[in-house]
Amino acid sequence: RKEVEQDPGPFNVPEGATVAFNCTYSNSASQSFFWYRQDCRKEPKLLMSVYSSGNEDGRFTAQLNRASQYISLLIRDSKLSDSATYLCVVNLGKTSYDKVIFGPGTSLSVIP
Amino acid sequence: DTEVTQTPKHLVMGMTNKKSLKCEQHMGHRAMYWYKQKAKKPPELMFVYSYEKLSINESVPSRFSPECPNSSLLNLHLHALQPEDSALYLCASSQTSGLGGRGYGYTFGSGTRLTVV
């Protein structure tokens, strides 16, 4: 089993739709969790951290379920500019550096 | 300053050339990383420096040689590369909270797009 797995995608959704991405991780010792967004031919950029209580940032909501080792990202009212690859990132956080595992990414295309 | 700066942005080199990629951050981050990313794949870890010491080398071929001159700078020296080494090379840095601490995630540079001919 891969350490971090994501929905394979691609997701093609109309503008205004709600879309959800799922991510599972295998290491129960994982300390912290993030969603990154990567546009074509650009570097990954931090979208949001994922907290145990769930957190929201505008149209984006992230959830964490430690018992099921599962993370989700919900995007409401999709915009064309949301088209990107979304990377689930898990941090083991037990060393003096960030031991980070990337998921394979899920591609989103928002169409007019 | 909340950026990681990488130079050059693009590099074309022959298989016999020697070149270097540079990365700089002034956020006080004590962990720095080199990643390689091929098209439509997630970034793959190459090296980790923690407090200017090499902590991880993910079995990277010796034609890639990292260097961390100080806490703000990270270099990647390239020599005798192969065409399959063509990729986006990303530098990242992170704040660290020590052993057992919560991770803070990475700040990535914009990358160097390397083409080996």
Image (tube, coloured by chain):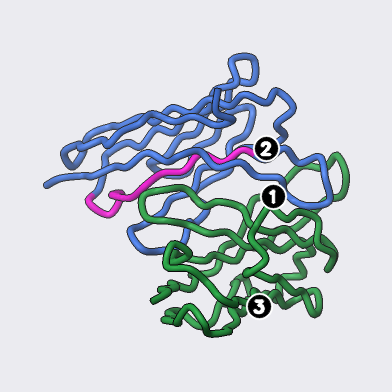
Three-letter amino acid code of the residue under disc 3: Glu
Query: Which is closer to the viewer, label 3 or label 2?
Result: 3
Which residue bears the numbered disc 2? A32
Q: Is residue A28 magenta?
A: no
Q: Are marks 1 and 2 on the same chain?
A: no
Part of the protein shown in magenta: A80-90
Instruction: Check disc 1 and give the amino acid type.
Output: Tyr
For mark 2, give the secondary structure: strand
The N terminus of chain B sits in image quarter: bottom right
Asked whether the beta carbons under mark 1 and mark 3 sit within 8 Å of each other, the answer is no
Q: In this picture, is A43 found above or below A22?
A: below
- Chain A shown in which color? blue
Q: What residue is drawn where x is 54% and y is 82%? A: B7
Pointer 1 with pointer 2, Cβ within 8 A: yes
Q: Nearer the viewer, residue A3 or B15?
A: B15
Q: Are marks 3 and 2 in contact (CB under 8 Å)?
A: no
| Of the pair B69 and A13, the residue shown nearer to us | B69
Residue on which the image places disc 3:
B24
Q: What subunit carries mark 1?
A: B
**Secondary structure type for disc 3:** strand
* Chain painted green: B
Residues at marks 1 and 3, CA–CA distance in whole angstroms: 19 Å
What's the amino acid at mark 2? Ser
For label 1, the SS is: loop
Q: Are there few (<14), some (14-19), or many (20+) residues within 10 Å of tag 3?
A: many
Task: Indicate the chain on which mark 2 is placed.
Answer: A
